[in-house]
């Protein structure tokens, strides 16, 4: 069931990602009772990528929702003619910010100007962030006649480390956990009247691609259930691995005395003159 939005603030963090994850059967795996017992994941390789993307957007969304009064946060804004969306758009005294969230769990990130590499593989995160901000900048200039640019941000969630050798000219790349403080430290750019106009424009579903919808409660409940299954499967795999390690260690301990005795006997026998 799709509920059409009357306000873009109704949209949920990671909504577009969740809709893709749950809407394409290829992202999910059928599991029998034995597979469940042994902790087989319910996600295919493509599903895992979408799932981790949703995790990152939800985590950043929670951080942004804690911004103080005067700041307005939007999630999963549909743009363009395809299935693209802006992960988060933040409007506040310090300006307008498009935030592209990337979840790279346990991977190193290296940045130098417009080059961003994940585990030494170049990724288009900076270019994509620039395009998102340019879209919204044009929108604000054309519809409202306001000057100034929308600031693009790439928020990295879960990386093992983030090294910025040279800061990009237009895009801010930072760890997601630093995002809230960074936003609040921005100098004042807009007064209350301009902020209200910008929020009104962004909040209007007519501003965006017509497929914009409010989150279906059933969809969110399905994702929560899937999230629980993924976590349970991971726990079971860990327990089976731990059980195997414990069993192996116990077997080694049990076999150690006979083996040691056999080695000593063999050595002693070899030393006895024939």
Image (cartoon, rainbow, N blue to C red):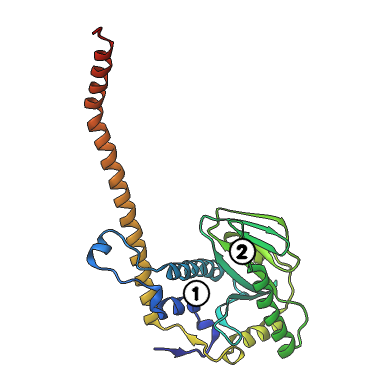
- Read off the residue under disc 1: 14
Q: Secondary structure at mark 2?
A: helix
Q: Is residue 154 above or below residue 216?
A: above
- Mark 1 crowd level (few <14, some 14–19, many ≥20, 10 Å Cα): many
Q: Is residue 164 left or right of residue 44?
A: right
Q: Is residue 104 left or right of residue 36?
A: right
Q: Where residue 234 sits: x, y (%)?
A: 35, 58
Residue at figure coordinates x 64%, y 69% from the top left: 124
- Front residue of this view, candidates 164 and 4: 164
Q: Where residue 241 sits: x, y (%)?
A: 32, 49
- Front residue of this view, candidates 112 and 223: 112
Residue at figure coordinates x 38%, y 78% from the top left: 25
Tag nearer the camera, 2 or 1: 1
- Read off the residue under disc 2: 179
Residue at figure coordinates x 39%, y 80% from the top left: 219
Which residue appears farthest toward the front when viewing the image? 274
């Amino acid at each position: 069931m799709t509920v059409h939005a009357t306000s873009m603030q109704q949209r949920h963090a990671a909504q577009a990602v969740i809709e893709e994850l749950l809407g394409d059967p290829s992202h999910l795996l059928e599991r029998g009772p034995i597979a469940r017992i042994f902790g087989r994941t319910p996600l295919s390789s493509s599903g895992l990528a979408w799932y981790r993307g949703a995790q990152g957007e939800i985590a950043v969304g929670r951080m942004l929702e804690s911004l103080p009064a005067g700041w307005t946060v939007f999630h999963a804004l549909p743009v363009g003619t395809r299935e693209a969306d802006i992960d988060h758009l933040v409007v506040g005294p310090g300006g307008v910010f498009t935030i592209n969230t990337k979840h790279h769990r346990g991977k190193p990130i290296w940045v130098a100007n417009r080059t961003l590499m994940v585990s030494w593989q170049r990724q288009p995160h900076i270019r994509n962030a620039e395009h998102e901000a340019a879209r919204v900048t044009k929108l604000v200039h054309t519809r409202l006649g306001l000057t100034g640019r929308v600031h693009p941000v790439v928020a990295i969630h879960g990386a093992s480390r983030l090294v910025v050798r040279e800061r990009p000219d237009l895009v801010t790349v930072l760890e997601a956990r630093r995002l809230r403080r960074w936003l609040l430290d921005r100098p004042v750019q807009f007064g209350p009247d301009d902020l209200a106009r910008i929020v009104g424009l962004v909040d209007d579903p007519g501003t965006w691609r017509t497929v914009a919808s409010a989150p279906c409660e059933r969809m969110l409940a399905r994702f929560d259930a899937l999230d629980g299954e993924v976590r349970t499967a991971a726990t079971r795999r860990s327990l089976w691995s731990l059980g195997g390690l414990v069993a192996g260690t116990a077997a080694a301990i049990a076999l150690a005395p006979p083996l040691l005795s056999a080695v000593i006997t063999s050595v002693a026998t070899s030393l006895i003159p024939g």
